[in-house]
Image (tube, rainbow, N blue to C red):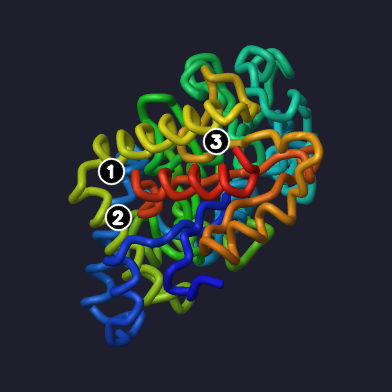
Amino acid sequence: MAPLSDRVLMGPGPCNPYPEAVEALGLPMLGHLDPEFIAVLDETCERLRTVFGTRNALTLPISGTGSAGMEAVFVNVVEPGDVVVVGVNGVFGERMCDVAARCGADVVRVDTEWGQPVEPQRLLDAHPAPKIIAVVHAETSTGARSDIAPLGEGKADALLLVDCVTSLGGIEVDIDGWGVDLAYSGTQKCLGVAPGLAPITVSDRARERFVAKSRSWYLDLRMIGDYAGAAKGARKYHHTAPISMIRSLHAGLGAVLDEGLAPAIGRHTDCGRTLQDGLESMGLELIPPASHRLPQLTTVRIPDGVDDAGVRKQLLERHGIEIGGGLGPFAGNAWRIGCMGHTARPRNVTLILAALAEALGR
């Protein structure tokens, strides 16, 4: 088996992080109230505003993975009885329903076949006056992208809440231009940082509708926002921040912005297109429609008679390549191949195509 240092992470989970992000994890420790760390935190929040495409003051990394970001945005705006419309076309739309229901929401599901994008008009028509319309931009379980801009245009008085875990840094995200009120992401995908933080951004409009008292102390954005310097007034202590992870995110965002956000997105697009063309040239079927197919996460149907686990084991043990299996109805029927962050390089695309062709005898 390939040494751990040589692994190529091409699953839907963590990608290979940018070298700058790895190096930052090993820097000497600072205190969480050290002025040098506070300066790094402030600059990290500003860099997040750039990649999110927003000027929202309340933009910061939550301590926890993407699901912590999901929970944070829900628990701060949802009260019992609030109507929450959720687009469900995969695992993470399902998870949104669960989190909203635990907040006491009246959840209105808009179900779509897995692998297909959520139709914006169906979400807008699902209820005459919801408090929140929620949708996953890039569904990690299926590789399908849903359109966000029409929801911002038609949301009326509702708050628009968007999961950007797999999209941020890999395809266009325009929070202010699309009229998104609440969004969250994760560090381990296209941002090229280890898992452990959940970047979020919240509009002033959404902040005006925060619940009087969040059901979660740890995820109370009134307090966390003060700590991160995102709210008006003096900075307040909330909890001990994960210093090394925030410094790593600062470095990873720096790598993206030094490359240029548009070129980084272009690199993801080019690698994804080359990978998908190569898979189709092998006679493999890609699941989402071409018009809404993510370049950074490709879902391919497993051919009949092929041993799902056996192929993934061969890729890992012989070539040091990790790809992901399917979830839900795709379990045992699909592979999910990620091309995200530092992993999104032509050499890795060439490697996975050759290794998969060998494993399939094609």
**Residue 213: x and y, percent?**
63, 56
* Along the line of sight, the residue nearer the viewer: 139 or 39: 139
Asked which secondary structure carries label 1, the reply is: helix
- Whether residue 80 is visible to the viewer of this picture, yes or no, is no
Mark nearer the N terminus (2 vs 3): 3
Q: Please name the residue that numbered disc 3 is placed on.
A: 138
Q: Residue furthest left?
A: 258
Q: Please name the residue that numbered disc 2 is placed on.
A: 253
What separation in Å lies between label 2 and label 1 (alpha carbons)? 10 Å
The residue under the point 34% across, 44% down is 346
Q: Please name the residue that numbered disc 1 is placed on.
A: 50
Total labels drawn: 3
The residue under the point 32% across, 43% down is 51
Question: In terms of image quadrants, where is residue 255?
Answer: bottom left
* Along the line of sight, the residue nearer the viewer: 162 or 236: 162
The residue under the point 73% across, 35% down is 303
Q: Amino acid under label 3? A: Ala
Q: Quadrant of the N terminus?
A: bottom right
- Whether residue 343 is visible to the viewer of this picture, yes or no, is yes
* Along the line of sight, the residue nearer the viewer: 358 or 350: 358
Mark nearer the N terminus (2 vs 1): 1
What separation in Å lies between label 2 and label 3 (alpha carbons)? 20 Å
Q: Quadrant of the C terminus?
A: top right
| Badge 1 density bin: few <14, some 14–19, many ≥20, Cα 10 Å | some
* Along the line of sight, the residue nearer the viewer: 278 or 340: 278
Asked which secondary structure carries label 2, the reply is: helix
**Residue 184: x and y, percent?**
50, 47
Asked which secondary structure carries label 3, the reply is: strand
**Residue 267: x and y, percent?**
31, 38
Determine whether label 2 and label 1 are within 8 Å by CB: yes
Indicate whether 267 appears above or below 292: below
